[in-house]
Amino acid sequence: DAKTTQPTSMDCAEGRAANLPCNHSTISGNEYVYWYRQIHSQGPQYIIHGLKNNETNEMASLIITEDRKSSTLILPHATLRDTAVYYCIVRPGGGYKLSFGAGTTVTVRA
Amino acid sequence: EAQVTQNPRYLITVTGKKLTVTCSQNMNHEYMSWYRQDPGLGLRQIYYSMNVEVTDKGDVPEGYKVSRKEKRNFPLILESPSPNQTSLYFCAAGGSNEQFFGPGTRLTVL
């Protein structure tokens, strides 16, 4: 699976949009980008995934660059409960294994 | 509601005393897996199962066993626990798009 690079940490103001970048420059054509988050020692939670088109659901939006070498997860109106570690994972379509890296620790401040 | 349950949630035991951590899902997913999470090492897959009676090793299987006799249950067995198995354990179930994680089992082996 392609390797991903994320910033170690970032802060965000409550009510503002949080933009979480992820670099996956070695992604191959059949690999999807997945985002999960883990709120303080709870089980990881699925957020969103995409192949090449931008995706949006009730939790977030995923913007994938045209060359697919990077993506951005957008939390449109961050709340204190969005404070968590966010993981960007690249995996082949139809695959199951999730390889978690270090992720980005996002702290939402009031 | 999609749910993965784990028991016990907390366990303190002694070296060599066999233990089982149970995992159960209510979503009829074929794929289930176990992860351990350690500071600085992140989440690592221990074992996974693609279906009943089909299990395979993940990245860190040493010292663990699993079984999959029924679709809903995927217990993790430590035949002779050692202190280096002190960790936070997560069970997961799901498909290739979204996986659901249990609340975690914090195990301490003295």
Image (cartoon, coloured by chain):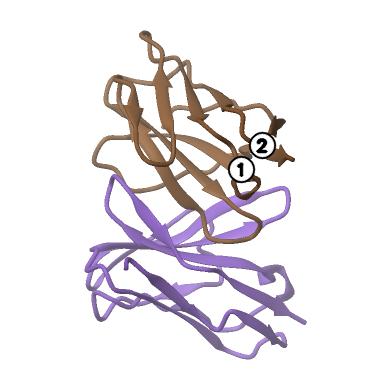
Chain colours: A brown, B purple
From the viewer's perspective, is A41 left or right of B8?
Answer: right
Cα–Cα gap, marks 2 and 1: 5 Å
Give the quadrant of the N terminus of chain A. top left
Of the numbered discs in the image, which one, if any, rests on residue A79?
A: 1
The residue closer to the viewer here, B80 or A46, is A46
- Mark 2, secondary structure of its residue: loop
* Chain assignment, label 2: A
The residue closer to the viewer here, B76 or A19, is A19
Q: Residues within 10 Å of mark 2 (few under 14, many from 20)?
A: some
Residue sitting at the far right: B110
Would you place residue B17 above or below residue A17 in this image?
A: below
From the viewer's perspective, is B100 left or right of A102?
Answer: left
Residue A92 image offset from top left, x and y in percent:
31, 34
Would you place residue A97 above or below residue B46 in this image?
A: above
Picture residue at 59% right of the left edge, 37% below the top: A78
Residue B30 image offset from top left, x and y in percent:
23, 63
Instruction: Read off the residue under disc 2.
Output: A14
Give the quadrant of the C terminus of chain A. top right
Picture residue at 24% right of the left edge, 73% below the top: B53
- Mark 1, secondary structure of its residue: loop
The residue closer to the viewer here, A1 or A60, is A60
Asked whether disc 2 touches disc 1, contact meaning CB atoms under 8 Å apart, the reply is yes
